[in-house]
Image (cartoon, rainbow, N blue to C red):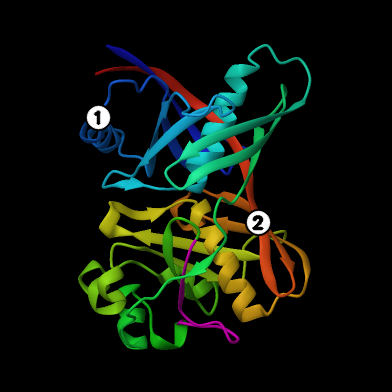
Amino acid sequence: MARRYAVLDVFTREKLAGNPLAVVLDSDGLDTSTMQSIAREFGLPETVFVQPAQRPNHTAKLRIFTPGRELDFAGHPTVGTAVLLAARRFADLEKAIDAMIVVEENVGPVRCGVKLNPNGPHYAEFSVPKLPAPVSVDFGDRGAISDAVGLSVADIGFENHRPSAWTCGAPFIFLPVAGLDAMQRAKPEVSRWKEAFGTQQRVGVFLYTRECVHHDSQIHARMFAPESGIHEDPATGSAAAGLAGALLKFDDLPDGTHPYRIEQGLEMGRASFMDLSIDVDGGVIKAERIGGYAVQVAEGELKV
């Protein structure tokens, strides 16, 4: 049968930038193996399969796949799919409006606010379904870690930031990097992955630094996940959500709301910009949100 799909670029205002996403709109009858094969066929960082919601007050159920495996939660699929579903619901939009989309992911329901603009790209922001929790990782020594990302020991760390691991439904290892020069030299060395990250070698590694290319950004980032079929990701919203745990821990964030703009994908020629907002109260994170723009670049039918 023919199944409709769309391709969007996420965390960007411009087409052919940001993080590409495939969304299969007609997913009824597809089993897990076939979904995985379709994701591998698209070859994009993630592919979303939209299914009917299990609860009547929710918009849709989503299953999210990389070319190598299924994910319980991911940021750019959430933003891109929320924009697509809201834009299809209000296809004859004549003025800017706000819409609410609730999607069911394996991690749980995710609430998304969408700002629809008839004259420009649409913007979506979602509340992170699970707040950052530390992950126990059997790190190798600092030399093994730096070797795994093609850097020297002196390139790892800045201020009091050191390697850590956090999850908001998708676990990541967070590597602070000294500056832009080191970030631009980094590359995944898969043969050193297990030595550096132990039993967690399938987890993505998110490199971050405060030195940025754009003046309105606060964090510059890259993400490698070669064991999941992603050599490098242009923008990783679920990692941005987990980064909040590292920022709270190492920066000792005071109570209040802390906004960050994270730039990612520049080394790939896929400039992406993610908005992270962290609410801190009593020294702990009470809520956080991830937001960004998305633009549709293609649509078609799958003959499967």
Disc 1 target residue:
31
In which image quadrant can residue 95 be found? top right
The numbered disc on residue 199 is none
Location of the N terminus by quadrant is top left
Q: Is residue 210 highlighted in magenta? A: no
The front one of 148 and 250 is: 250
Please, what is the dominant secondary structure of the magenta stretch?
loop
Bounds of the magenta segment: 156-167
The front one of 99 and 226 is: 99
Look at label 1 and name its amino acid: Asp
The residues tagged by marks 2 and 1 sit, at their Cα atoms, a distance apart of 33 Å
Is 122 placed left or right of 185 in the picture?
right
Give the crowd class for mark 1: few <14, some 14-19, many >=20 residues within 10 Å. Answer: few
Give the crowd class for mark 2: few <14, some 14-19, many >=20 residues within 10 Å. Answer: many
Q: Is residue 257 above or below residue 233?
A: below
**Residue found 30% across the figure and 36% down from its top:** 39
The numbered disc on residue 288 is 2
